[in-house]
Image (spheres, helix red, strand yellow):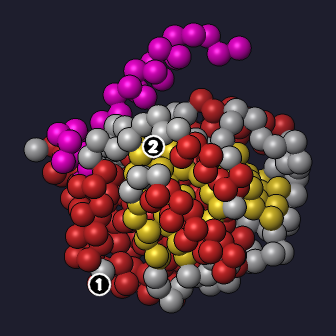
């Protein structure tokens, strides 16, 4: 079945991390004090994860993520704008690159081809060229790991290479365990609306889970973060309007207060009859914990697709939407 080959591709995440290690090492940028990752969808997730990882590693540069046609108003000649679009044909990202050019920002392009690659060649901008033929969301290792090389070469973050190698080894060693856990969670999620909660610092990881349920399992799913969710979403358990299943992601380095909030929230929603699973992300390095949390979510979403008879790979509705929008003049 077509879906089996896509599931196998998702299962090979650690192998793809390893393949991606050699990319991006020829790109070096200097003279910037802030970094904006711009892109949308499966490509922008790489920016969110880079922001999480890099913000934990250094305070000397600031990292931002932008998912829009424009770039933030602070973008100037001391800003590096990293434009990430797997296909290279996404109108929002192409437009954001133009906006960054107008502000004289430094630009790095991450793409497998398309108009963005042509633009980079014409404008002589540095490119991280990705392998072709993968769904953008499944290309995450290639969108993420090479940028660590670029950011390290440019002096923004410490050398990530030993963390990357150790992460690959850990993920490979844990692969059977992760597949079993993801399968068991997927079985509990059949017919449910997943709600994914994490601490604010891991918002991008919870959001990745949400979007993978959307695109792979083709269902609605929502993510929210502690402490904010205790001030609004918690009230929604008073009058349940769908068949929810809560997934709580907890990182060892989350603060004690956040862990206490998660514990209490789990108790309250349990009393309201809503089932939940807590996933405690383990690993010596932050990178290992970050990527293992992503990998378990990815696996859960494709196993859920299989259990519900859905092909996780195509996203026909997104492609049709883009075609229809493409027929409307871009002014
Ligand atoms: O996962 C997907 O297919 C989408 O979310 C795409 O990533 C999104 O539409 C943007 O396309 P691209 O990643 O090619 O810029």
Q: Is residue 21 visible?
A: no
Q: Is residue 158 visible?
A: yes
Q: Is residue 177 left or right of residue 296?
A: left
> Which residue corresponds to the image point at 10% horizontal and 44% vertical from the top-left?
1
Could you tell me residue 261's position as x and y percent?
63, 68
Residue located farthest toward the left when viewing the structure as drawn: 1
Which residues make up the magenta segment?
Answer: 302-331
Residue located farthest toward the top when viewing the structure as drawn: 328
- Label 1 C-beta lies within 8 Å of the nearest ligand 1 atom: no
Q: Secondary structure at mark 1?
A: helix
Residue to which mark 1 is pinned? 173
Q: Secondary structure at mark 2?
A: loop
Between 179 and 62, the residue placed more toward the observer is 179
Numbered circle sitting on residue 294: none
> Which residue corresponds to the image point at 35% horizontal and 72% vertical from the top-left?
14
Mark 2 vs mark 1: give the one in front. Answer: 2
Between 247 and 296, the residue placed more toward the observer is 247
Residue to which mark 2 is pinned? 221
Q: Is residue 326 left or right of residue 314?
A: right
């Amino acid at each position: 079945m077509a879906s089996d080959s896509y599931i196998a591709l998702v299962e090979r995440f650690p192998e793809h991390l390893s393949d991606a290690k050699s990319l991006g090492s020829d790109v070096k940028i200097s003279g910037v004090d802030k970094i904006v990752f711009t892109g949308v969808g499966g490509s922008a997730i790489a920016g969110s994860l880079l922001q999480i990882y890099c913000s934990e590693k250094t305070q000397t540069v600031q990292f931002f993520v932008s998912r829009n046609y424009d770039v933030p108003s602070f973008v100037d000649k001391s800003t590096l704008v990293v434009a990430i679009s797997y296909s290279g044909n996404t109108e929002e990202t192409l437009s954001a690159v133009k906006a960054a050019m107008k502000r004289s920002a430094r630009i790095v392009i991450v793409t497998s081809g398309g108009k963005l690659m042509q633009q980079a060649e014409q404008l002589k901008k540095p490119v991280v060229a990705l392998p072709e033929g993968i769904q953008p969301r499944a290309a995450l290792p290639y969108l993420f790991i090479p940028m660590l090389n670029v950011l390290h070469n440019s002096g923004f973050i410490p050398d990530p290479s030993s963390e990357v190698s150790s992460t690959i080894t850990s993920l490979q060693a844990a692969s059977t365990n992760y597949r079993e856990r993801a399968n068991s969670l997927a079985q509990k999620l059949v017919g449910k609306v997943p709600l994914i909660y994490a601490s604010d610092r891991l918002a991008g990881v919870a959001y990745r889970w949400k979007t993978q349920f959307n695109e792979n399992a083709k269902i609605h799913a929502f993510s929210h973060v502690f402490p904010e969710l205790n001030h609004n979403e918690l009230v929604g358990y008073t009058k349940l309007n769908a068949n929810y299943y809560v997934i709580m992601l907890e990182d060892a380095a989350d603060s004690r207060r956040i862990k206490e909030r998660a514990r209490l929230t789990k108790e309250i929603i349990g009393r309201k009859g809503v089932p939940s699973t807590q996933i405690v992300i383990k690993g010596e390095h932050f990178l290992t914990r970050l990527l293992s949390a992503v990998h378990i979510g990815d696996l859960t979403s494709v196993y859920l697709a299989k259990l519900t008879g859905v092909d996780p790979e195509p996203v026909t509705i997104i492609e049709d939407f883009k075609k229809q929008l493409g027929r409307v003049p871009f002014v």
